Amino acid sequence: MSDHHHKETFVTKYVFSQDHKMIAKQYLITGIVMGVIGVFMSMLFRLQLAYPEQSFSIIEAFLGRSGEGGVMTPDMYLSLVTIHGTIMVFFVLTAGLSGTFSNLLIPLQIGARDMASGFLNMISYWLFFLSSVVMVLSLFVETGPASAGWTIYPPLSALPQAIAGSGLGMTLWLVSMAIFIASSLLGALNYIVTVLNLRTLGMKMTRLPLTIWAFFVTAIIGVVSFPVLLSAALLLIFDRSFGTSFYLSDIFISGEVLHYKGGSPILFEHLFWFLGHPEVYIVLLPALGITSEIIATNSRKPIFGYRAMVMSIIAIAFLSTIVWGHHMFVTGMNPFLGSVFTFTTLLIAIPSAVKGFNYITTLWKGNLQLNPAMLFSIGLVSTFITGGLTGLILGDSALDINVHDTYFVVAHFHLVMGISAIFGMFAGVYHWFPKLYGRMMNKDLGYLHFWITAIAAYGVFFPMHFVGLAGLPRRYYNNTAFPIFDDLMEINVVMTVFAIIGGLAQIIFLANFFFSISKGKKAPQNPWRSNTLEWTTPVEHMHGNWPGEIPAVHRWAYDYSKTDENGELWGGQDFTPQVLPIRDGEEEF
Amino acid sequence: MKALLFIIIFVAIAVACWQFVKLLGLTKVEDQTATERENNINGWLMLALMAFIYGLMIYSMYGAKDMLLPQLSASAEGYHIDILFKISMTLILVVQFILQFLIYYFTFKYRGVKGRKAYFFADSHKLEIIWTVIPTIVLAGLIIYGLWTWNQVMDSSDAENPLIVELYAKQFQWEARYSGADNELGNASVRMIEGTNTMGVDMSDKNASDDIPLMVGEGKFVKELHLPKGRKVIFKLRSQDVLHSAYMPHFRAQMNCVPGMVTEMAFTPTVTTAEMRLNDDTKAKFEHINKIRTEKGEEAVEFDYLLLCNKICGSSHYNMQLKIVVDEEADFNKWIAGQKTFAQLNN
């Protein structure tokens, strides 16, 4: 371990750091910056949807030529939804969430000095940073950023004649995503190797906290599916730049027939969703892992059904790789394949239901400490169920026909993966802030943040289901072209008002976060009275995490409120850290 | 520059938030997990959130009543879909009401009290088997019924004398072609698009001459697509440029149009436009719409079936539509007899 004590310069400590804790912070800050951009975009296009013909100086101020007179152009609207989707799914909820917490918690919770390869870890972050820079740069190109939807289906994404955003903007999008995928693969490989090899003495796989299980399995599905998106993107680059016909065939546009022959856009859809669907769980599983930990700690109770939770994480991960076709029921895919995908898709409801019930049972008869992290975790369980249930409609091929690509879908996935995952991320930040920065976040601001955000989230996305059931397709610049949607205007305004309130409420979080880094109260050793290993490390960060030996682990992470044979709490306190040996007469769970 | 001003305002709000809370928090004793008072307040607020969610659900359902598509499906296939939809939706709502109640009620009931011991309850095979087996049984039912419905909708192989219609999608309009007397569409390819032959139909194909096109030149749009009530319509879908999706919400029908291939969907219209205009749901919806339109000074509209594009296809994706008219079969035959075939057009 001697190499952990060499002299640090400013650059090696804060910029090209190989320390997992610093890298976690870098991921988090980059994720937050990208999140601000993504959420801000959504506020702009919500304004457009609620007040299609009105002029807003904020739109002109930020969109320039594409928002001349305070009204955005249709192309700009499509760009905004495209980049909002891309940024939120990949840059915030994949890199920002998984990158932050996998990096911070894997070594700390399994008892390792650092990741298996600190160097790869550093490269992984800087590739992510680079891809963020490219994505942000793409917002400023002359023909506008990518605007074919975050799913970038060709031919629209392949032909600059079809939409202006498919010019340089799309090229930069593809370059950015290719770099992003490289980053996420390096990260994921590192997580897998670290979890398998660097666990401390006594940290059996069956004693791992559920956070680690979630990060571990997430990394595996990332490694399995991200390369497929990379190949999809590469083939698209070939079609765009080198005249190949992987996805294109028989196209007549701008008055001429293009030379493409024999390709199929459906191939792209298959490749895209082979990542795209597991991606939902790449986003969600870490949030569920974080929630499991926080709910158990703050209920002062063990998580209910630890083994079932692990099994359902694995089952969800496995199933998630064989359900991608449910995004393609109406693409012209063979109806028999549709039946198969309906079957596998609806199966996912079983492990998901088990997780939901287990969370609820964990709350039952607990002694709930309702701090901001706990509120966000409970909020996650609530939105996960609300959003997840409508999956029964969308996963059923026959029912999907009429709600496919309508606002019903938008409502569904925003609740089940967007809001749920972002709640998980907030919960994680509130809970592990003391471990990240050695200080506490302000609790009152945390409460305020939760209450406004939770109400706004439901206020935006619950009514949205009904807009979808009224038949309104998503990605419409406005709905005034159809008289039959005239009566949706009122509800559109309601959703926009909630969206803006919810968006502005994030300023509370940002204020709390950035001020607490330097001005927060100093954190105690174990602020949440938690069992896991990370709370045995010094509050001030040090390279190598533990000053002396790495502690050995003697029990699982969830011995909360465990009693002895007389019904008294062991040692008079309601938690038993993993480092404490099994006592005389105690049965290990 | 104005953008900068907005950013400065946001930052100022952030600073204000922090300063304000710091003033409030000066005298507070910090308990790092949560004080009893905080647990109490937030426990009650969680109940309030539950009330808000229930309220929002009821409000949305009630408020959306007139907004939704007419309950009556305009196609025979849609009837099956609607039954499955109602079953699934009922199930979802029941589960949603129960589970949300449990989450928020437990949060409220077990909000932390100093000195109370949580119940160490780590496992129960019985419970876990119950909530694995029950969802499995329910889902098995849903899957089987869903697949049966899917086959009803997608399988049009046994249709007797179906009407074959081609829908042709391009940025940003629809064209159509009826298969004519022989009920077979002539071949077509984008490579044959030339002059007035905007759909690229192969005029040398013997099946083409009796095809009846609904196509128009530059800057004009096809006005309406007619369909007969009670006869199965098989749609052959093609696209000229990018992905489009033919979405007919009233018929519960949708299928993508994919360049380079022909996709297919089928349904039997069961309600004519005139009948649908008399439907109670439709009347309520259009009364509402026309009230809004009058307030805005726009003219009143009548119900019509619609074909919408439902796959992002470019700038004017939001306005790629075609009116559909469902006629009694006799009226339809009269209408189609008045349309020109390629043979008649080319002479």
Image: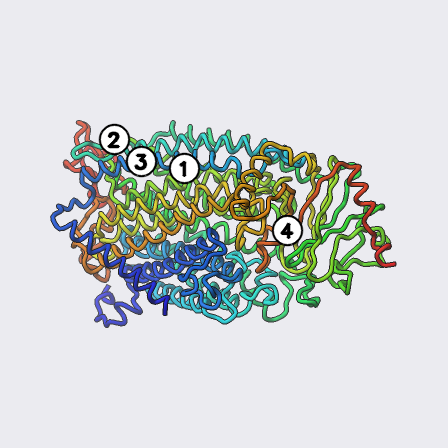
Disc 2 residue crowd, few under 14, some 14–19, many 20+, Cα 10 Å: some
Residue pointed to by mark 3: B48
Q: What colour scheme does the image use? A: rainbow
Dot 1 surroundings within 10 Å: few (below 14), some, or many (20 or more)? Answer: some
Q: Residue A455 carries which label?
A: none
| Badge 4: residue crowd in 10 Å (few <14, some 14–19, many ≥20) | many
Q: Are marks 2 and 4 in contact (CB under 8 Å)?
A: no
Residue density around tag 3, few if under 14, some if 14–19, many if 20 or more, within 10 Å: some
Residue assigned mark 4: B321
Query: Is residue B20 shown left or right of residue B300?
Result: left
**Distance from the alpha carbon under mark 4 to that under mark 3:** 44 Å
Question: Which label sits in the foreground, 4 or 3?
Answer: 4
Q: In which chain is the residue bearing label 1?
A: B
> Gap between marks 4 and 1, in whole Å?
33 Å
Q: Give the labeled residue for mark 2.
A: B119
Q: Which residue is drawn at 43% across and 52% down?
A: A220
Foreground: A424 or B56? B56
- Dots 4 and 3 on the same chain: yes
Say which residue label 1 marks: B56
